[in-house]
Image (cartoon, helix red, strand yellow):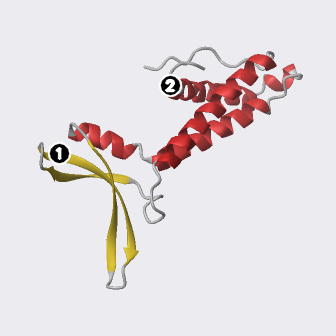
Amino acid sequence: MARHGRLPDPRYPKENRCLTSALSAAAKLLRGRAAAIGAPEAVRDTPWHVEECVNAESGDCPCIVAQGRFDSGEGPVEARLYVADAETPAHATWIALMHPGVGLALADWLELEASLLEALPVDDAEALNTVPARLVLQSCRHALTVARALLGGAS
């Protein structure tokens, strides 16, 4: 189970800037990796799936593809973007699950958490003790766990 660490403490704005930076850095990493795939427009927003394919060297292996539809003028044609071979069906299924759309959704969430953390009223102890402020802090703790995992624990 992931270790969440302690909650961000809004009384320490310098520490919170560091935490906000970690959230933003992880979001930037996800966006960069998603963009680096360079999927064609036809399949960019399409989830990946696993298909069986044959590799001349190793025989049957699971393949990951992104799939979208386009019209060639002769009726609808499936557009496929080859992504990777995987050692096992379980690996292939995991890779397909974590397609760039998932990364971009995670990036959006991390950026939202960074914005919420920045918006906390650090000079108002009473406001910091409200349920909404405490929920922001709790949610940021989980987002920081994800950010640290993405950044290799270096945040």
Identity of the residue furthest to the right in this view: 123
Q: Residue furthest front?
A: 57
Position above or below: 108 against 137: below
The crowding category of the residue bearing disc 1, from other C-alpha atoms within 10 Å (few below 14, some 14 to 19, many at least 20), is some
Nearer the viewer's eye, disc 2 or disc 1? 1
Q: Secondary structure at mark 2?
A: helix
- Which residue occupies the foreground of this view, 22 or 36? 36
Image side of residue 5 versus residue 113, left or right: left
Q: Secondary structure at mark 1?
A: strand
Q: Which mark is residue 149?
A: 2
- The answer to whether residue 95 is above or below residue 123 is below
Quadrant location of the N terminus in the rendered image: top left
Q: Quadrant of the C terminus?
A: top right
Q: Nearer the viewer, residue 97 or 8?
A: 97
Where in the figure is residue 48, as x and y percent of width and height?
Answer: 36, 52
Mark toward the start of the polypeptide (2 vs 1): 1
89 above or below 130?
A: below
Residue at left offset 54%, top offset 46%: 104
Q: Position of residue 60 (x, y in %)?
A: 12, 47
**Residue, x 42% and y 47% (percent of image)?**
99
Task: Please state which amino acid type lies under the numbered disc 1.
Answer: Cys
Q: Residue at x 32, y 74 (%)?
A: 77
Extreme residue toward the bottom, this view: 74
Cβ atoms at labels 2 and 1 below 8 Å apart: no
Q: Position of residue 136 (x, y in %)?
A: 69, 30
| Left or right: where 77 falls relative to 124 | left
Q: Residue at x 78, y 22 (%)?
A: 129
Give the quadrant of residue 78: bottom left
Q: Which mark is residue 61?
A: 1
> Left or right: 95 with respect to 89?
right
